[in-house]
Image (tube, rainbow, N blue to C red):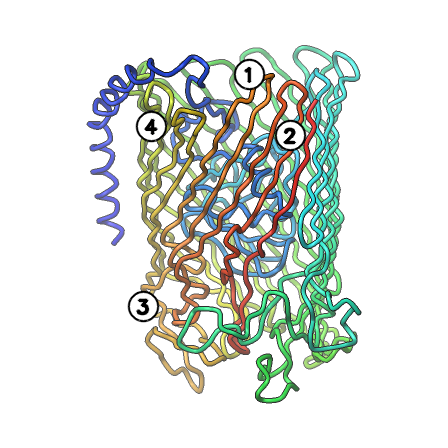
Amino acid sequence: MLRPALLAATVSSIALLSAGSALAQVQTQAQTEAQTQTAAEPAGVDDIVVTAQRRSENIRDVPFAVSALTPQTLQDISAGGADVLALSGRVPSLQVESSNGRYAPRFYIRGLGNVDFDFTASQPVSVVLDDVVLESVYLKGFPLFDVQQLEVLRGPQGTLFGRNTPAGVIKIDSVKPSDEFTGFGSLTYGNLGSTRAEAAVTLPASETLQVRGAFLWNHRDDWVDNAYNPSFANPDKDDLGNFDDIAGRVHVAWTPTARLSTLLTLQARDYEGTGTMNRANALTKGSNKLNDNFDRDTVYYDGGRNNFQKQKTTSQSLRVAYDFGPATLTGIVGSYQGWSQGDGDIDGGVASAPATASYKTPFNSETGTLSSDLLQNTYELRLASNGDARLGWQIGAFYWDERINLVSGTFNGVGNPQPTRVTDIVQKSDSWSVFGQGSYRLTEALKVTAGLRYTDDNRDYFGRIVLGTGAGGTGAVSVGDEQVSWDVSALYEVNDSLNLFARVAKGYRGPSIQGRNLPVLTTADSETVMSYETGFKARLFDGRGRLNGTAYAYEVSDMQFTAIGGADNSNRLINADKGEGYGLELDGDLYLGAGFSLAAGAAWNHTEIKDGDLLVAICGSNCTVTDPIVTVGTTRRAKVDGNPFPQAPEYTANLTLNYVLPLGDDTEFFASTDWTMLKDFNLFLYESVEFMQDTHFEGGLRAGWRDLGRGLEAAAYVRNLTDEENVIGAIDFNNLTAFVNEPRTYGVQLTKRF
């Protein structure tokens, strides 16, 4: 199927070239209509400036698919206390999910991701916060606050952003200090005892020294009753669902001369709350719908100590830049330190319960992280040309190292705090690379860009069983690889309102190790991705609208998968021979007039495993497998050739409608509603009726009043407006256990800006 997709992409690029004049004609016709609008209405949509290529440029000049989320969007979707999982579906082809609560999210772009829940796992989507990569899932859940812009870069980004970016990059930039005294304070209060307090201020100490401080407190009360075990229960019967997430950031900008600038950043987070709440027997054999056993407000746990989680992280980074005139030399040093602990009733029920109980499980499964320590260091040096000359270039070098020490335990599931099995693992990783990118404007309309990166990866893993069956057993393995990533792209400016682009890129994810089943260790070889995309970026209706479209296709060689669960309750790394993906993406926004504006996006993403010999364990519960079954020894395995990638929705869509009504005296009424949809995705590698998901959607509403002159805003909000109960994950080794999305939240919000 890949060859037809590539042919379709080529035909699409030719069609887009011929479409240039047609789009231009549509805009010319629209100019007359635009001139009839009143002068009081906005002239059109604002230009979006991004740093997707490590330099500021209009989003229309970036030769690949990139989307940007504004601070207002992030504020809207986080009003009810949501974490980074709320980003899922906000731009085309983006999926975010987690079975580890609020502190270990997993990102997927165009279907590429990794379902592994371990802190030691790698992902093909990188998160970069203020130019520092957050490699481990341990760090990727750092809360979003005081954000200037969030960019989603789709497709391989190995040239400029390095290893483990074959699917793309989530690039987050926080607000930096300026030479003006500015800031804001915001307080949100809602149901479930939800409170979100956020504040930030910039203090210009002098002409050369500025400081920006930002703070977040995100809180929710317990609201779920553990109806089984009185030793866990509180008198008010609210035992789970709480969280307290406190985070702070300080930027210190010092510019001693016109050429030299420095930025010191200090961050910290202290999080404590309830992890993912698994719910036993929430699905019924032959159906993927939640059954009557599911109750949002109630669980039945005999273990997990109410699924508690704790995490502390601190970080420091220093960015120094010196402008030599023709070029600027930039150095970035960053370090993250972290510690976490947690426990979970994985089966979500009680093995000793009566056979007729809705929460009866075949056996108890309780696991926890007794302690997890992480240290990550990054170093980058980059020299980039200045100005808008015909030739632009940048070269650099990068080094990253990481150490994770994880002590985990399994428990007997009846409230005994002493583990029955303990494992202690240490994983050390390092990677260094050199890279370069150059762009050349062949004509006033055509610019070509090419990049190259060489990467050397190494990873060492050592584990031992400290307590329980196999105590004293050890496992050790080392993996490494060297790879070259590259990309070539072209951007053609048809006219002032239409750009066409095409890109070919090779991406790379380094080798991985999995030691969950000590003393058995599994490894996966490096995977490489060849990606092809073409598209357009257009301004429509005399600048009142914007529309971007992309057609893409990619092929993954030696694709890494994590086979989790199954009847043997294992967590193994495997390589598939190949994986394929192709699809279409559209996103844009439009000022409709009369105070209304619309932003929307949609994507069709087809993914397919291509390996006729790949077999994986199937569910240990009573599920209905639809794949061909092969018996290997005494175990049954599913052939997954032709299946979609796990957690890869075939369709995603988002829509936001805004309305602003001027009230006079610099005040206005505003309202907005936003909706996302994910459709047709599989939770596991094998296919079964119960774990194939249909359509998930969520919507929100926010409305209020602003005084622009005084910087005041008062609003009311509702998140998950229709109280959808969407299955976002499942446990397949024990029973038909599932976990779901956030409940409906609502409340009020007050904001003061200055």
How packed is label 2: few (under 14 Cα within 10 Å), some, or many (20 or more)? many
Q: Measuring from the top left, give residue 6's x and y in whole percent.
A: 25, 44
**Mark 2 or 3: the one toward you:** 2
How packed is label 3: few (under 14 Cα within 10 Å), some, or many (20 or more)? few
Q: Which residue is mark 3?
A: 612
Disc 3 vs disc 1: Cβ atoms closer than 8 Å?
Answer: no
**Mark 2 or 4: the one toward you:** 2
Seen as rendered, the residue at the extreme bottom is: 355
**Earlier along the polypeptide chain: callout 4 or callout 1?**
1
Q: Quadrant of the N terminus?
A: bottom left
Give the number of callouts. 4
**Earlier along the polypeptide chain: callout 2 or callout 1?**
1
Q: Which residue is mark 4?
A: 490
Disc 2 vs disc 1: Cβ atoms closer than 8 Å?
Answer: no
What amino acid does circle 4 point to? Ala
In whole angstroms, how far apart are the C-alphas of marks 4 and 1?
Answer: 23 Å
**Earlier along the polypeptide chain: callout 2 or callout 3?**
3
Label number found at residue 713: 2
